[in-house]
Amino acid sequence: MSATSGISRRTEGRSWVSTLFSYASRCKGKMVLSVIASIASVAAGFVPFYAVYRLMEMAIVGSLTWDGALVWIAVAAIAYVLSKVLFGASTLLSHVSAYAILESLRKDFVSKLMRASLGTVQSKSIGSIKTVFIDRIENIEPPLAHMIPELGGSLILAVGLAGWLVSIDWRMALACLICVPLGLAVFASSLKEFNAKYAAFMAESAHVNSVIVEYIEGIQVVKAFNQASDSYEKYANAVKAFKDFTMEWFKSTWVTMNLMSSIMPTTLLGVLPVGLALYLGGALFPADLAMCVVLALAIVDPIARFTSFVNELKSMEYAVADAAEFLDLPELPEADRRATEVKDSSVELKDVRFSYGEGEEVLHGVSLSMPSGSFTALVGPSGSGKSTLARLLVRHWDVDDGSIAIGGVDVRDMPLEQLSGLVSFVAQDNYLFDASIRENIRLGNPAASDGDVEAAARAACCDDFVSRLPQGLDTPAGSAGLELSGGERQRVSIARAILKDAPIVVLDEATAFTDPESEDKIQRSIARLSAGKTLLVIAHRLSTIVGADRIAVIEGGRVIATGKHDELLSVCPLYSRMWDAHVGARAWAAGSSGEGSTR
Ligand code: ADP
C-alpha cells in the first residue's frame, strides 16, 4: 500500500472525498434524511434543558405549582423521547445507507476483478486485496453510519448551547468555554505528527496483513522445509514491528490525549467562580446561574465527540482512497459491449506477440489455425509458452501484437461475456469453491436443472468417487475437495465445462501421471466434453494427443512444427525426443506400479 503523509490522498486525480460522494450520492435521499433527523433530534434535545430552566425560574421566584411543574415535566419527557426516536431514525437511515454503499463498493470490486487483466489482478498480493476487500471497506461503515449524522448534530448542539450561554450572559459563555481552546490547543499539538504517523501505521498494518496471508498460504511449504527459520522469522518480525510501532505511537500521544481529555470537560472550573462572582454582584439571576451550570455540563459531550471523529475521518480517508485505487485499476478494453455474431467456432492466431508486463517477450509471432470442430494440441518443453497462448485466447491478458479471432471476430472486439460463453477453459489447478460438488458443477450453467448436473457428472465419469462420498453430489466440496485426487478434481471441472457446453474447449492437461484407470476416465470425459467442439489441449502426456488433427510443437515462444503425430515423429526431432521420453517415462511408471504396457 502506498502511504502518503500530511496530504489528502488522491487517486487518478480524484480525491477520496469525491469517490465517497460518488457512492454516497447513490443513496442521497436517505443520507440527507438521516442528517435532518439528527439535527431535529438535537433540536428536540434542547427542550428538556429549557424545561429545567423554566422550573428553576418558577421555583426561585416562588411561582412553582404542581400543575405548572407537570406541564414542563411532560414537555421535557415528550421532547426527550422524540429526540431519542429521531436519533434512532437517523442512525437507522445512516446504517441502511452505509451498508448500501459497502455493498455497491464490494460489487464494483468483483466486477473490476472480472474486467481487469489477470496480470493486473496478480500484481496485487492476496494480502493487500484481502485488506482492501474486507478490512478497509469495513472501516468505512462506522464513520459513514455514525459520523455523518452525528457530526452535524454535535456541531449544532455545541454551537446552540454556546449561543444559549451567550444569550444568558456573554461573560458566563466565555468562562465556560475558556478551557475548550486550551484543550483544543493540547489536542492540536498531538495532531502535529498525526498524518505522518497514521500513514506509517497503515503501511505497517498492510505489511503485517500481507505477511500473515503469505505465511498461511505457504504453510505447507513452511512445514515441509522451513519450520523454524526464514518464513516464521519474517512473520514474527512483522507482528513484532507492528506491535512496537503501535505502542510507540500510543506512548507518544498518551500524555497529550490524557491532558486534553482532562482539560476539556472542566467547564465548571470557569463557570462556577465567575458565575458566583456575578451572582453575588447582583449581575446574574440565580435561575440563570443554575442554567449556566447545566449548559456547561451539557456542552462537554458534543465537543469531546467532535475530537473523536478526527481518527474516524482519517480511517475513512484511507479506506476510501485504498478502495478507489483498486477501483481505478485499468480494465481490458472492450470496443463494443454489444455481442458480435461469430460465423463458426474456428480459432485463428495471427502473428501473436506477447510479454508479461515489462518483461521479455515470451511469444514471438505465433500463428495457428484451428478449424471449427477440430482437435489441436500444443506440445513443447516447460516454459515454451503453451499456457500463455491458451490464456491469451480467453483474454486473461491481451496480445501485444497480432490477433486472436474466433469465427472471424477478434476476441478484443467482443464483450467479455460473449467470449466467456464461447470458450470453456479447464485449467490444471482446478479450484473447487466452498459449496457442494453439485453447485461447483452448476457454475458451468447456473440455470441447469439437477438432472442436467447429474448427467454432466456422469459424462465426466464422476460417479465412482461421488458414490463414495457421504452425501454424494451434495457433499460440500470444502471437505470433499481435500479427499479428492487431482484427477477427480479435474473430472469435476470437466463436468462443469460439459454443463457449460461452449463451442470451444481449452484444456490444460494435468501434468502429473495419474493411475491408468483414472487416466482412462479423464480421457473418456474429455472425449464427451469435446465431441463436435473445437478442442485445444495443452498436452503434457503425449499419448493423449496422438489422435489430434494437428499438433503444434512450441519451443521458446515459437511454433517450430505442425502436423499429425506420425508426421511429426519423422520431421520434428524435438517432438520425436519428447515422444521417446514420454514412452520411457510411462514404461518406468507402469513397471514400478506393476503394470505391463505403456499404451
Ligand atoms: P508452458 O505452459 O509452456 O510451461 P508458460 O506459458 O507457462 O509456459 O510460460 C512461458 C514463459 O512465460 C515462461 O518463461 C514463464 O516463466 C513466463 N511466465 C508465465 N507466467 C508468467 C507470469 N504470470 N508473469 C511473468 N512471466 C510468466
Image: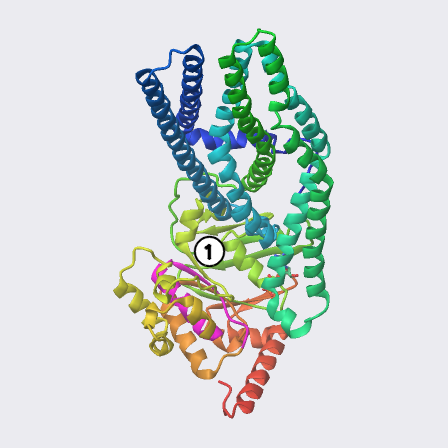
Where residue 17 sits: x, y (%)?
56, 29
Give the colouring mode of the picture.
Answer: rainbow
Q: Is residue 399 visible?
A: no
Question: Where, by quadrant of the figure, is residue 32 drawn?
Answer: top left
Q: From the viewer's perspective, is residue 214 above or below residue 397? A: below
Judged from the image, the quadrant occupied by ligand 1 is bottom right
Q: In the image, is 397 to the left or to the right of 534?
A: right
Disc 1, ligand 1: is the CB inside 8 Å? Answer: no
The residue at which mark 1 appears reads as 347
Residue at coordinates 42% horizontally, 28% vertically from top-left? 31
Q: Along the line of sight, which residue is nearer the eye, 498 or 134?
A: 134
Q: Along the line of sight, which residue is nearer the eye, 6 or 486?
A: 6
> Of helix, strand and loop, which one carries label 1?
strand
Residue at coordinates 59% horizontally, 63% vertically from top-left? 216
Question: Where, by quadrant of the figure, is residue 61 drawn?
Answer: top left
Three-letter residue code for mark 1: Val
Q: From the viewer's perspective, is residue 451 above or below residue 255? A: below
Magenta span = 484-512
